[in-house]
Each structure stands twice: as C-alpha cells, then as structure tokens.
Image (cartoon, grey):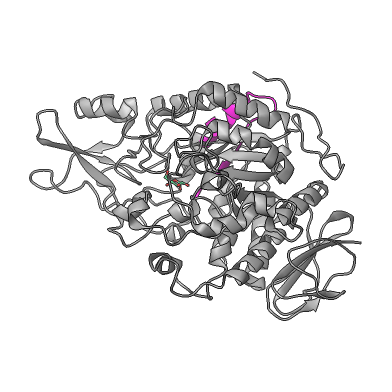
Amino acid sequence: MSEPATPGPTARDDGELIAIDGTDPDWWRQAVVYQVYPRSFADSNGDGLGDIAGVTSRVPYLQRLGVDAIWLSPFYPSALADGGYDVADYRNVDPRLGTLDDFDAMVAAAHDAGIKVIVDIVPNHSSNDHAWFREALAAEPGSAARERYVFRDGLGDDGQIPPSTWQSNFGGSAWTRTTDPDGTPGQWYLHLFAPEQPDFNWANPEIREDFHTTLRFWADRGVDGFRVDVAHALAKDLSEPLRDANPKDFDLPLDGSDPLYDRDEVHEIFSGWRRVFDEYDPPRTAVAEAWVPSARVALYARPTELGQAFNFDLLRADFDAGTFSRIIDDNLRLAAESGASSTWVLSNHDVIRHASRYALPAGADEEDWLMSGGTRPAADETRGLRRARAATLLLLALPGSAYLYQGEELGLREVADLREGDLQDPVWVRSAHTRKGRDGCRVPLPWDTSTPAFGFGPAAPHLPQPAWFADLAVSVQDGAPDSTLELYRAALGARHALQQGEDLRWLDAPGPDAIAFARHDGWVCAMNFGTDPVPAPAGSVVVASGPLTAAGVLPGETTVWVRS
Ligand code: GLC
C-alpha cells in the first residue's frame, strides 16, 4: 500500500532548499511539529467551534511560519466530555467540525504546502457514546460485549464498594457503577479519566484488530503519522485481587510492575502497530505520550515500536542552566540508545503556557496561581515572555523534533481568569473545584483585531477571549520586526539548515548561569539564563531572542544563534 508522494523539496522564503520532503522516510527525525487544537484554531462556519475547514484556511499561515508538520488533537465525533479525547467514532469527523471530504481537502492543502499531517489516536478509552460501550451496557455481565471494556462486580455485600482503590487522573474513583436495565445497581466499569471515558480491555484481540483498522483508515487517507494518547496505560494487570497502583507517574517502578501504567506487555501492542506503519511507503510515524520516568520513555521510542516519544522534561524544568543542560544531555543519550530522535516540548494543550510559567517566581505553585485567577503570586509578564522566547530559541537549536503548541508563536499567556461558568475541563468538576484545569491554554486564537472574536470566527468562541488578546493577534505581529511571531518565523526559516545533522558539542559555559553548544557547519547557540550579561559567542548573529544591546555581549535571559 502506498500513496502518491507529496511534493519534493520546497524552496522556503530564504530560498534555501529543504531536505524534508514527501519521500524522505526520516522526515520526522528533526521535524518542527505544530500542534493544532482544532476546536480552538479557526472557526469557518460560525458556530463558535474551530473546524477542519478553518485549519485548511490557515495552511498558508502555517507554511509561512515554516513548520514541517501539523498534529491535530482529536476532531472525531465526541460529546466533548474531555475536549474530544472521548471519541465516539474513531473513523469519522465530528459533524460540527466538518466531514471526511473536508478532512481530505485539509490533508491535500497541507501536503501541497509541504506540510505533513499527524492525527491523535486515543486508544486507552473510548467515549461512553461509542457504539461498543452502549452495547456493553445493554449486555449481560460476562458477555463478549462487556469483554471489550473492563467490567467488574463491586466488593461488599451488595457490590456497593468499587472493585479496587484505583483513582481517576481527573480525581475521584476510577470506577463507576452501572444501572441494569431493570433499574437495579449493576457492575462497575473502569475509567482512568472521566466516567465518560471507559477504558478498553487491551487483552481482547478484537480491540487490537480494531485499532489496526483505524490506523490503516487514516494512513490510507494520506495521514503521515500518529500521536498516541496515554500510550503507557493500555496494558493492565487485571488479575484478581486487583492490586493498588502508584498515584504519580514519576513514582512508577522501573521494572514495569505497576498494575496500570508502563507495563512491559504494552510494547507487544506497539510492535504490532509498527508492522502496520511499515505497510506504507514512506512508513507512517508515531510519537508516544507516555508520562513515565525518562529511562522508560525510550522504550516506546524504539524503531521497532512508535519511533518517537514525548520528552516532557523541559516542560517541567526550572529556568536554570544546570537543569536544562542535564536534561538535554540525558535525552540525547536516551534517544541515541534507542535509535529514536529526541523530542522537545515547552507547551501543549494540557499544561500552563510557558510564557506564564516563566513569569512566576521560582517555586510558585502553578495550580494555586491558576486558582487565584492569575493574581497570586503576581506574574511578571514581560519577564515571562522574554524567558519564553529565549527557551524556545534554545529548543529550536537542538537536534531532534520540536513540538510547538498553537499560539505560542504569538507569545500567548495562559488565560488564568476564566470564569467558573465558562470552564469545560472535567478536571474542574472531578477535583471538587480544587483544580481549575486546562481551559486557559485552549482559548481560541487571536488572528485579526479588525474582525469579531479577533478573527477566530464570526460567532462568540466556545471559550471567551480576554481583551488583551488584541495586543498579541497575528495581524498586529505580522511584519513587526521585534514580534514573537517574526522571531518564530526567523528561527524556523534558519533552522532548516540545522536539520541537516543530529550532532551537538558542548562549549565552555560563557557564564555561571549560561550554556553554549556548537552544531555542524559553524553554528553556535548560547543561552543566558541569568540576569547579568555574559560574553556572546563569536560569529555573525543569525537570530536572537531579544535585543542585543552591545557587540560581543549576551544580555540576561536571552538566547542567540551565531554562525562563523
Ligand atoms: C492525554 C491528553 C489529555 C487527555 C487525556 C485523556 O493526556 O493529552 O488532554 O485529557 O489524555 O485522554
């Protein structure tokens, strides 16, 4: 099975011919992947929700930005109990977002622009609206229909106690009791996330086969790769009695002995997926979302499995030279050992935007800050943006793939003061209103200050945009030399030359809280994490994250790329 190759090498704005093209099987190793959260990207039909045609309409913007691929968060039919990560039909488009024809048109437009398309696959759980779960609820305990999910009798005299102590990632028990057709309480089913997200039983071969069908369905439509949601949770030890699990991902044992997460059997599943990817030319790619200790992340990224896994270390790191350089070293080593390329991430749809994280004093509790509506402690927004620009420019200089999240190229901050009535994230309700959740990074993008909803679409957006979005809209930043958008464009344009190799050589640190490294062909990147200036590397400046006030000097909280 193969599909017509997408266009060959593309000439970018700078006239440089890029190596990443439709036929290169290694295109993913050093790709810049831009995450689109479709319901908050661009609304073409005026229902307040972003849609597939909205993505198509912005392909020229993405091409001008210089990304190699887009990753679309789920756009499948969904009741939106968890922002679309509750999928009712894996092989269709949510009618509110368009049709399969719209999807095909979007893929064609992206490919014509030299941009690959990655879709999100959610294999741990479906929506409770999925036909299989409805069938399971209507079926008898022990039936084949129930064997597709995880149903158990409750404990206690009346089965009123959940079958185990397992907790949902969104708060509360991971078990919900069903009601039998005659109205009496029935069995319990497992959901590691919201009750509307019942977990599949991956010991059942029918589930394995069905996901192979789903992968082929999208690969046959020209999709280039897959982002695999909660990849570390599929295999579970469901033998009785059900054992207690580890509540925190970073406390997971390194020997795969937790009953729920990061079990060794999960790797058989992904070896099977690799065989499906390799039916295609070029082979389809994948990246695992696996919140497990770094040493175990590499297992998911083996070339015989998914090929890449997210490295979330920088996303949680303090803004500190020692921490960053250790993380870079560790992850380059792990990627080399597994044959993968490393990945780098500072923001996504699940975390507070990095321009806001870096605006908080060291040690501040981000959840508490969100709960205070972004008022306590006070955020230093100027500093947050300065540091975010510096960290991004560092990330883009590293070998491996960079995953960017929509809106970070505008320097968007977290919308921390959404009103309670506007919150959609199940985290808010499931945590009994003690955690505000992830809506603040999912507010629809500001495109244009002269049109309603800042150009997101003609109707009121599904999450309200703050007035300050006007200062950061694309129309305001387009062509403005010092804008964050122009910084991203310049860095992505220059990066194509860096994508020719995967080398990195550390140089002497130019200061106590600074790092510097060389890449091939005379490229050097230096970042000053501290506030005092340090000596800048020699060479001509290619791009800098902030103003360079004097020759030979790298100001505080600034990154520079030079070439000698
Ligand atoms: C992943 C997604 C997150 C979702 C969860 C459950 O962590 O990134 O948004 O809530 O899986 O599907």
Against 564, residue 322 (above or below) is below
Residue 514 rendering spot, x and y as whole percentages: 72, 74
**Residue at x 72%, y 80% (from the top left corner):** 512
Q: Residue furthest top?
A: 1
Query: From the viewer's perspective, is 413 left or right of 31?
Result: left
Q: Using the rendered view, name the quadrant where residue 418 is placed.
A: bottom left
| 226 drawn magenta | no
Quadrant in the picture for the C terminus: bottom right
Between 262 and 175, the one lying in front of the other is: 175
Is residue 279 in the magenta section?
yes
Q: Quadrant of the N terminus?
A: top right
Nearest to the observer: residue 486 or residue 265: 486
Residue at horizontal 54%, vertical 65%? 356
Residue 388: name its quadrant: bottom right
User: Relative to residue 240, is residue 484 depicted above or below?
Assistant: below
Residue 396 appears at what percent x and percent y?
71, 55
- Is residue 319 visible to the viewer in this orientation of the structure? no
Where 249 sits versus 218, above or below? below
Q: Which residues are magenta?
A: 270-291
Residue 522 in view in this figure: yes
